[in-house]
Image (spheres, rainbow, N blue to C red):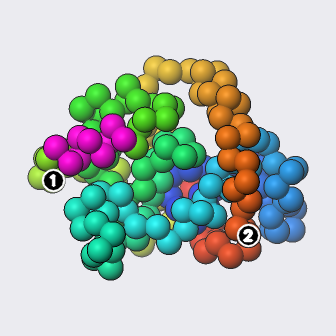
Amino acid sequence: MAKVSIGLRGWRFEESDVFAGDGSFRPLEEMPPDARQRLSRLTSLANRPCDACWLEHGEEEIERCNPAQAVYGEPMAEVLLCDEHEPDFVYWFREEGGSNHRGSDDLDDAFHEWYLDGGAAPEGYGGVAHVETDPGDLPDPEAALDATSEETDAAEDAEADADDGSEEGEEPAGIEDLDLSREYPT
Ligand SMILES: [Zn+2]
C-alpha cells in the first residue's frame, strides 16, 4: 500500500486511510484515529514558519523565517523545519540524544533548547538527502528516524491513543484549504 505525505514532508499516511477510491478525502470520522489526528493537526500547521528560523528571528521578524517544509514528532509536540534547518534536527535526533524524546510530548522543547544553546549540525552534515527534481526519490524522514530507534510501534500506538481527545475544540479548519501537494514516494 502506498504511503503519502500531505502538505508537509515527514508525516506519512497510508493512502487508503485518508483517500477514497476517487482521490477525494475520506470523511475524518472514517479515518483511523492516528491519521485523523495528524491530518487535523496538519491543517493548523499549514503555512507556519520553521521552528529554528522562528527561534532566530522571532515573531517581530517573522517575514525572515522560511516556511516549514517538514514535520517531525507527534501532533502537538511536533517540530517544523525548513530545508536549511532540517539537517540540524536530524543531527540532534541521531547524534545528540534527540531520539530519547521520540514519541514524547517534549520533543519540540528539547530540540528548541538544544538549538538555542547553539546546537547545529556540523558543516556539510548530510542528514536527509533531498532530491528536488525527482519526487520519486523524496526522502522518508520517518524511516530515517525509525532506523535510529529501537522503540516499538506498539509503544507509539499506545501513546497516540492516550493523546486522543486532547484536541477537543480544535476542529479541523477545513482540509480542502490545505495545499494538497501529495507526494508519492514511488
Ligand atoms: Zn529554518
> What amino acid is labelled 2 in the image?
Gly
For this orientation, the residue located farthest to the bottom is 63
Query: Does residue 91 appear in the picture of this structure?
Result: no
Q: Nearer the viewer, residue 170 or 65?
A: 170
Mark 2 or 1, closer to the camera: 2
Q: Which quadrant is home to the C terminus?
A: bottom right
Query: Which region of the structure is painted magenta?
Result: 109-117
Mark 2, residue position: 174
Mark 1, residue position: 124
State whether label 2 is within 8 Å of ligand 1.
Answer: no
Asked whether residue 111 is drawn in magenta, I would say yes
Q: Give the percent coordinates (x, y) of residue 120.
A: 18, 48
Q: Give the percent coordinates (x, y) of residue 49.
A: 40, 67
Q: Nearer the viewer, residue 69 or 146?
A: 69
Question: Which residue is at 73% across, 69% downward?
Answer: 174
Tell me where residue 157 sits by quadrant. Answer: top right
Magenta span dominant secondary structure: helix
Q: Give the percent coordinates (x, y) of residue 146.
A: 47, 33
* For residue 89, above or below residue 19: above
Question: Which residue is at 24% across, 68% downward?
Answer: 57
- Mark 2: secondary structure: loop
Q: Along the horizontal axis of the image, is 172 left or right of 66?
A: right
Q: Give the percent coordinates (x, y) of residue 121.
A: 19, 47
The total of numbered circles placed on residues is 2
Crowd class of label 2 (few under 14; some 14 to 19; many from 20; radius 10 Å): few
Asked whether residue 53 is drawn in magenta, I would say no
Q: Nearer the viewer, residue 60 or 88?
A: 60
Q: Along the horizontal axis of the image, is 176 left or right of 26?
A: left
- Mark 1: secondary structure: loop
Q: Are marks 2 and 1 in contact (CB under 8 Å)?
A: no
**In 3D space, how far apart are the residues under numbered discs 2 and 1 (Cα atoms)?**
39 Å
